[in-house]
Image (cartoon, grey):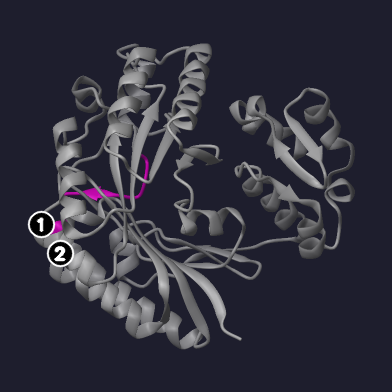
Amino acid sequence: MSRRIGLYLHIPFCRSKCLYCDFPSYPGQEAQMEAVIGRMTEELWAWGKRLPDARVETVYLGGGTPSLLPPTLLERLLSAARDAFLIAPDAEISMEMNPGTITERLLQTAVRSGVNRVSIGAQSAQDRLLKLLGRIHDFAAVKRAVEQCRRAGIDNLNLDMMLGLPTQTLMDVEETLERLIALSPKQISCYGLIVEDGTRLKRLLDDGVLQLPDEDLERDMYELARSVLENAGYAQYEISNFAKPGFSCRHNVDCWQRKEYLGVGVAACGFLGTTRYRNPVTIPAYLAGEAPEITELTAEDERFESIMLGLRMTEGISDAEFCKRHGLSIRQAFGDKLDGPLQNGLLTFDEGVLRLTRRGMDVQNAVLVDLM
C-alpha cells in the first residue's frame, strides 16, 4: 500500500517585504532563483528515492511569492515533482499568487503544469490599507487577478483578507467582505494580524507611529466576518477559513489532521512519522546543503499537537480517533486540564467530539495554555 503524503514547496523570493512579514522571504534575490530551483529539484529527487512508495495527494507552493517565478522555472519545479513522485490524478495543486505579479504566461504555464487551485493575497479592499501594509497591489489588481485566473481555467480560488490592521474599521471589514464575496471565490481566509518581533510593523508600533485596534474591536471584526461569510454560503471549517461546500483546502486540512507531508526548499518544514524538520532558513545556507533542523516528537508532544491542530477545525477532535492514534482517550491524556475551558464555555465535549465553542475560537491560545 502506498504512503500518502502532501508536498510543500517554499519559494523564498518576494518583490518587497510587507510591513508585518516575518516569513523567510527575501526581496532583491531574483538572481538566485535558478540556483534555488535547481537545489529544490535535487531535494525532490532525493526524497523520491528515499520514499519510493509515496503517493502525493496535495501540492502547495507557498512563499514568499511563488508567482514571481519565471514560467520556465515554475514548469521545471513541478516537472521535477512529477518525476520524483507518483502524484495522484485528483491531487489538489495549490499556488499562492500576489495580485501584483500575475501574468497570463505564468498562469498558462501553471495550468499546463497541473496547478488547479490559486490563493490570492487580497488582504483588503481599501487601497490606503494595502499601501500602509507595504503591499505592491491595489484592489483593482485583485479583480484583474481573479479574471486572469478564470480565463486561464482556474476557478478554485481562495482570497485572503486581514483583520485588526492599524486604522482599520468595522466598515472597512464589511466593505472588504462584500467586495471579495462579489468576486465569487470558492474560499475566503480571514487572518488576524499578528505582530512579530523584528518586523517594521513592530518597530512602528513600539515608536507610537501606528496603533492597533483594541481587542474588543478586533473581536467584533472577526465576528462580523463569520456572520457575513456564513450568510453568503461560506461554511467555516477552520478558525480562519471559510469555504463553499466541497472546497476546503485539502492540503491545509491534512496538516491540521497531522497527516505526513514533505517540505522542500528554503526554510520549508516537513512532518514524517514522529519527526518534524525544517530546512535552512537562508538562501546561502540552503544552497550550501546545510542539514535541516530535526525535532523528534515525544508521545506527549504528539498528543498535544493533535489537540493544538485539531481544535483549529470546526469539526473538532474525535475521541475515538484520538484514542486509536495515541492509545489514550482525550480525558486520560489531559485530565482535569479540560475542566476550566469546559466550565468557562470555551470547549464542548459532546458525543465523543471535543470542539472549541464560537467564543473559544476567539481565545484559542488561552485554551491551549490551559491544556499545556
Asked whether the viewer can see residue 82, the reply is yes
Label disc, if present, on residue 50 of the rendered structure: none
Q: Position of residue 163 (x, y in %)?
A: 41, 25
Q: Position of residue 225 (x, y in %)?
A: 45, 26
Q: Position of residue 187 (x, y in %)?
A: 40, 44
Towards the viewer: 350 or 70: 350
In the displayed structure, does residue 221 sit left or right of residue 151? right
Give the magenta part as a residue range. 22-31
Q: Could you tell me which residue is drawn at 42 percent across and 13 percent down?
A: 213
Mark 1 touching mark 2, by CB under 8 A?
yes
In the displayed structure, does residue 7 sit left or right of residue 117? right
Residue that badge 1 annotates: 104
- Residue 186, relative to residue 107: is it above or below? above
> How many other residues sit within 10 Å of disc 2, few (<14), some (14-19) or many (≥20)?
some
- Residue 155, relative to residue 347: is it above or below? below
Q: Could you tell me which residue is drawn at 50 percent across and 16 percent down?
A: 220
Amino acid type of disc 1?
A: Glu
| Marks 1/2: CA–CA distance | 6 Å
Q: Could you tell me which residue is drawn at 83 percent across and 25 percent down?
A: 343
